Amino acid sequence: MAQDNWAHKWIDISVPIDPSTLAVWPGDTLPSFEKRMALANGDSANVTNLRLGAHTGTHIDAPSHFVAGAADLESVDLARLLGECFVADLRGCAVVSAADLRQAAIPAGTKRLLLKTDNEQKNVWATQDFVEDFVGLDVSAAEWLVDNEVDLVGIDYLSIQGFEQPDQVHLTILGAEIVILEGLDLTGVEPGPAELLCLPLRLVGVEASPVRALLRPVSA
């Protein structure tokens, strides 16, 4: 019973990796599942091969995604990926700036920050078509994250920076070894303090990995 109560408090904020519905970044590998063995075909077991990119669905970016010689996925401190976080309300912003972050009532000392944006109102996860006008950060917001010593920042679509925007947002954040958590589904999540759990696959020599991200709201 205690275990059930613990589990029921958590909200799954990752998106399903469904090859028939999930959008991917333009040019990225579309996920596919191949049944190598199937009980329905008389085989002794079901066995599936997966084909997908490291940045599929809800995923984290390690610094090596944009910074040569920087830490790769295997070197990311897992302590950054679980613990207290804050869900900031950035709805109403076409692009998130430092001024927007300053006005978002983010508690001083926040180490894990999730950004709830108008991507929810845009229903970005309701279509397999890539949504080009999603909300991302500008460079001033990236610099704010560095100045405030954030360890992890998450956002509710496939990239922390806007489509066809300069890479300086990624470079600024990852250059400071801040982990980026992209592809969140924050639909129905209330802004405020919470606990976060998001763990990647233990992939060696890569810059990113899909994660299963869970959130548990806590009383302020």
Image: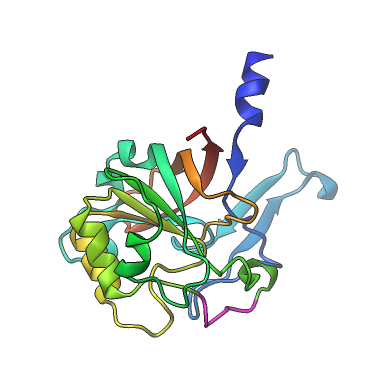
* Residue 192 seen in the current view: yes
Q: Is residue 187 magenta?
A: no
Residue shown at the point (55%, 69%) measured from the top left: 118
Q: Position of residue 72 (x, y in %)?
A: 26, 53
> How many tags in the picture?
0
Asked if one can make out residue 66 in the rendered structure from this viewpoint, the answer is no
Residue 184: x percent and y percent? 53, 57
Image location of residue 135, percent across then percent down:
48, 73
| Above or below: residue 3 compared with residue 63 | above
Q: Residue furthest top?
A: 1
Does 159 appear above or below 6?
Answer: below
Asked which colour scheme the image uses, the reply is: rainbow
- Chief SS of the magenta region: loop
Q: In the image, is 145 to the left or to the right of 188?
A: left
Quadrant in the picture for residue 172? bottom left
Residue at 59% over, 35% down: 10
> Measured from the top left, where is residue 220 in percent x and y?
47, 35
Magenta residues? 129-134
- Residue found farthest to the bottom: 164
Rendered residue at 62%/28% (across/down): 7
In the rendered image, the quadrant that contains the N terminus is top right
Image check: 198 left or right of 168?
Answer: right
Residue in front for this viewpoint, 102 or 71: 102
Residue for point 37% across, 61% down: 103
